[in-house]
Image (cartoon, rainbow, N blue to C red):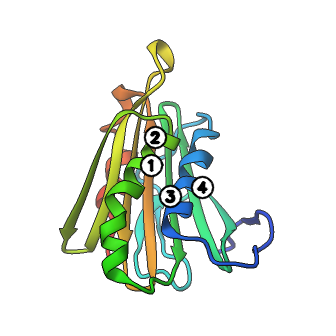
Amino acid sequence: MNEKVTQIGTPPPAMASIAQTLTWLAVLVGLVGFSSIAKASDVRTFQPQGCEFKASIARDAEVKQSWRGENPMTTAVQKSKGGVVRTSCGSYFVQDWRAFHQQLPSQLERAARLAGIEHPQTAIRRTSTGMVASYWGFRGTGATRTFFRSDSYVGNRSFMEIVVLAHPEYLNTQDVRQTRTSVRR
């Protein structure tokens, strides 16, 4: 299958941290608008080279290549009339796992604040897929009020982040459920 891949920027000289990645993704997702609806039955597997995880995404999701430090990151964006589901995978290296686990709760809170979430909720849990670090909540007011959720699946050498930005009535659509429940290692 020929997949359209767009490269954004050039690789910076130094590797960025997980916190910088979460921050970057939170800001990037805030720039995405809403457009046409994706067919939930028309899906494909998203597992970029080197990614420990895979997920089901809409066949017509736009795939882009960007850089996080010296490592490439691949992102698929599914747009619908009610929101956006962004699935990203990138590699990383953790020198000190103990420090990583200690800093993760505050990093999640920081990323949530930078995403503009009011009264964010955070969670770190172990699943059959591995560790999942999440933050979620609402941002905006009135007609522009949207729900924002980020779930990062942390592997030994890579991570996959599923970000949902949607109007509340679209949170439980098949597109959103399919991607969020499809992550496997």
Mark 2 crowdedness (10 Å alpha carbons): few <14, some 14-19, many ≥20: some
Amino acid type of the residue tagged 3 in the rendering: Leu
Q: Secondary structure at mark 3?
A: helix
Separation of disc 3 and disc 2 at Cα?
11 Å
Q: Are marks 2 and 1 in contact (CB under 8 Å)?
A: yes
Compare marks 3 and 1 and give the one earlier in the sequence: 3
User: Which residue is label 1 attached to?
Assistant: 110
Q: Is residue 65 left or right of residue 9?
A: left
Mark 1 crowdedness (10 Å alpha carbons): few <14, some 14-19, many ≥20: some
User: Which residue is label 4 attached to?
Assistant: 24
User: Which residue is label 2 attached to?
Assistant: 113
Separation of disc 2 and disc 1 at Cα?
5 Å
Q: Is residue 52 left or right of residue 5?
A: left
Residue at the spot 52% in from the left edge and 80% down from the top edge: 92
Q: Where is residue 144 drawn, in percent x and y? A: 51, 20
Q: Are marks 3 and 1 in contact (CB under 8 Å)?
A: yes
Foreground disc of the pair 4, 2:
2
Amino acid type of the residue tagged 1 in the rendering: Arg
Q: Are marks 4 and 3 in contact (CB under 8 Å)?
A: yes
Disc on res. 130: none
Separation of disc 3 and disc 1 at Cα?
9 Å
Compare marks 1 and 4 and give the one earlier in the sequence: 4
Amino acid type of the residue tagged 4 in the rendering: Trp
